[in-house]
Each structure stands twice: as structure tokens, then as C-alpha cells.
Amino acid sequence: MENFPGKSLYAVKANPSPDLLRVLWDSGITHYDVASIAEVRLVAKTLPEATLCFMHPVKAEEAIRQAYFDYGVRTFSLDTMEELEKIREATNSAEDLNLCVRLRVSSDHAQLSLASKFGVEAEDSKELLIATRQLADGLGICFHVGSQAMSPQAYVHAIERVRAAIVAAAVTVDIIDVGGGFPSVYPDMEPPALKQYFETIDRAYERLPISYSSELWCEPGRALSAEYSSLIVRVEKRRGTELYINDGAYGALFDAAHVGWRFPVKHLRRDASEEALTGFSFYGPTCDDMDHMAGPFYLPGDIMAGDYIEIGMLGAYGCAMRTKFNGFGSDETVVVSDEPMASLYREDRSAPMAEDNVRVLRPNG
Ligand SMILES: *Cc1c(COP(=O)(O)O)cnc(C)c1O
């Protein structure tokens, strides 16, 4: 809120917890990026005064209609002529729309790609931009560089695509939305400070021919929610360096299992263990072999069944991804006030510190 040189939305999908939504609202976030009618309803109910922006480029017509007429949504994204026509029909040719054309950009700097599913190529965007300009009260261009972008350069390259699209279509643009992708801190993933991202984006944006008359937006999910929660799990069984824990791939640990994401971990025991750290992998509680998290997660060598582990930095894409598969999944939520296990919001630093717990969990670190 203080350092981004424009308006910061929150991408609700990263963590739709009403409690977090209220924390963000109280911190000054007024605009929310929603992707489904259920997210529209949730935010409208939790924060009745919030401004909702429907930024999924492929929407059901009835979702657009409900969002527009019942919930006052005026901002929509799109990446095809068909979606533009759908929005026109669903809103009865409304004249008060902000329409954001989603450009396809590279995910090369990101840990999780968002490059193949959505977006029109800048080279092919002329006709769509001109048609959208005619229908829109406010015309936007948006993109997403992929999640956990490890370099600010990702945004520079994307903004160059925006420039090419604007020049080719010769349209005036009211909103440039640089999307999400802002990183958080995880073991072996230590991005530059957020300030460096903001300064780099500001410079690239100011060089656009429309910067004097347009607004700059971003819509982070991960960066605003990763530090919000930890997961506490119990070790049910130990087999060598494999720990069978009571949450996993079908619970809040989807990314740990399916994309090998490493989260910081901490052994919770009344008397701290003196044993050296050993690399462990985890099995989740379901009967499925895929319910496996390779890690390695560094924990004291004497960890055993009955012990508890805090898995940190799970505020983003953690609880949001849970299923009830096999009947597992706990719903107990406890509000605590201690520091997150790592943070990108502490002053005067660009890398984690010892007290972030990230470093001490490494064998040689
Ligand atoms: C997922 C998503 C975001 C949030 O991405 P993060 O990488 O979590 O910041 C923002 N905008 C859109 C359109 C998304 O799909």
C-alpha cells in the first residue's frame, strides 16, 4: 500500500479467508480481484463497500450478468472477441464498464507458469483492443508474469509487450494492470526486496506513451497472503527419513506435493531437540501414493510419531486448495499473533534473516 506506485488489488483466490479479507480492508486495500461468482458473493458479503474486479478472462455469461446487475461489478477482463461479445450481451450493452484486455507474456522468471492458458499475443491484439475501446468506458491492459516471479525484469519484459500492443492499436489506455506474481520468501527462494520490483515497474510504466493519462494497478495474491498463516501437523508415523503427517497433497500442501515447493518447517516440542537437522520427506494422510512431499524438510534427527511440526508461509495457496478427500482435513483455525516464519516486509533488508527461521532450517546455512 505504501510503496507500490499505483493501486494494489488483492487476488482473492490465494486465500479467501474472511478474516484475512478484513485485515486487508483495514490496511487500505479497497479493490479485490475475483475470478468466480462465488468469490464475488464472498467478498461482497464480507466487505460490502469493496470494489470487485472480475479478472478471469473466461467467464460464464450468467456469472457476468449476476456480477454486473446484483453486485455492481464494473471491471472485467477478456482475451477474445467472443468474451467481449459475451460481456456486452450479459450487461445489456452497458456503458459504464472497465474492460481489461489480457496479454500473454512470458513466465520465464516465475516459479509457477501462467503463460499458456490465457492472454492474446501482443502481435494479435490490435483488433481486440480497438473493439474493446469502442465498448469500454475505461480500457485496460493486464497480464500476469506467473506466480513467485524471482526477478523484477519479468515486469519490464511484460510492459514492453504492452507498449507494442498500444503502439500497434493506437488506442488510448486508462489502466495498466501488471497483475500478480510478486514473490514471498521460502527456503532456497530469496527474491529481491519488493521495493526493487516497485521501482523497476515504475520506471518501465513511466516510459509508456500513455502513462500521463492512465492508472497503474497490480493484483497480488501470494505477496499479500503468504505470511498470514502456518499449518500445524502431527507426525503419525516415522519410516526412516519419511514422516507420515496428517495433512498433505489433498489438503493445504498441494504445492509441496505437486510442484515440489519447499516450505519452512519447525519442530514443535516442549523441550527443544538437541539433535542435528536431517532432511525428511512427508507422506500425507490419504491412501494415495501421490500424497507425497519430497522436500527435503530439515528437522531434528530424533523427531518421532506424536511430535508436531509447524509448516510456515502457507497463507497463500495453502488452505485455499484443501479437499476432504478420504475424509481427512482439519478445520481448526487458531488466531495467533507471533511473527511469520519469514517476511518480505521487514525494513532494510532484501534477504531473510536468521530469526526468519528459514536459514536455520538449512543443513549448512
Ligand atoms: C492468480 C492470479 C493473481 C495472483 O497471483 P499471485 O502470483 O498469487 O500474485 C492475480 N491475477 C490473476 C488474474 C490471477 O489469476
Image (tube, rainbow, N blue to C red):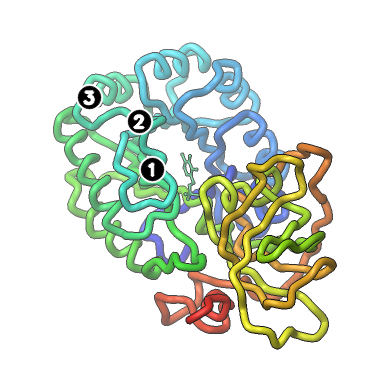
Q: Is mark 3 on a helix, strand or loop?
A: helix
Furthest toward the front, the residue is: 240
- CA–CA distance between discs 1 and 3? 17 Å
Q: Name the residue under label 2.
A: 119
Location of residue 249 in the rendering, given as x and y in whole percent from the top left corner:
66, 46
Label for residue 8? none
- The first of marks 2 and 1 along the sequence is 2
Disc 1 under 8 Å from ligand 1? The reply is yes
The residue located at (52%, 53%) in the rendering is 260
Q: Foreground residue, 125 or 213?
A: 125
The residue located at (53%, 76%) in the rendering is 362
Q: Do the residues labelled 2 and 1 touch (CB within 8 Å)?
A: yes
- CA–CA distance between discs 2 and 3? 10 Å
Q: Mark 3 points at which residue?
A: 124
The residue located at (78%, 54%) in the rendering is 246
Q: Are marks 1 and 3 in contact (CB under 8 Å)?
A: no
Disc 3 under 8 Å from ligand 1? The reply is no
Q: What element carries label 1?
A: loop
Please tell me whether residue 235 is drawn above or below residue 58 in the rendered image. Answer: below
Q: Report which quarter residue 201 is drawn in.
A: bottom left
- The first of marks 1 and 3 along the sequence is 3
Q: Mark 1 points at which residue?
A: 144
- The first of marks 2 and 3 along the sequence is 2
Location of residue 321 in the rendering, given as x and y in whole percent from the top left corner:
65, 43
Please tell me whether residue 267 is drawn above or below residue 257 in the rendered image. Answer: below
Q: Give the amino acid at mark 1.
A: His
Left or right of 122: which side holds 114? Answer: right
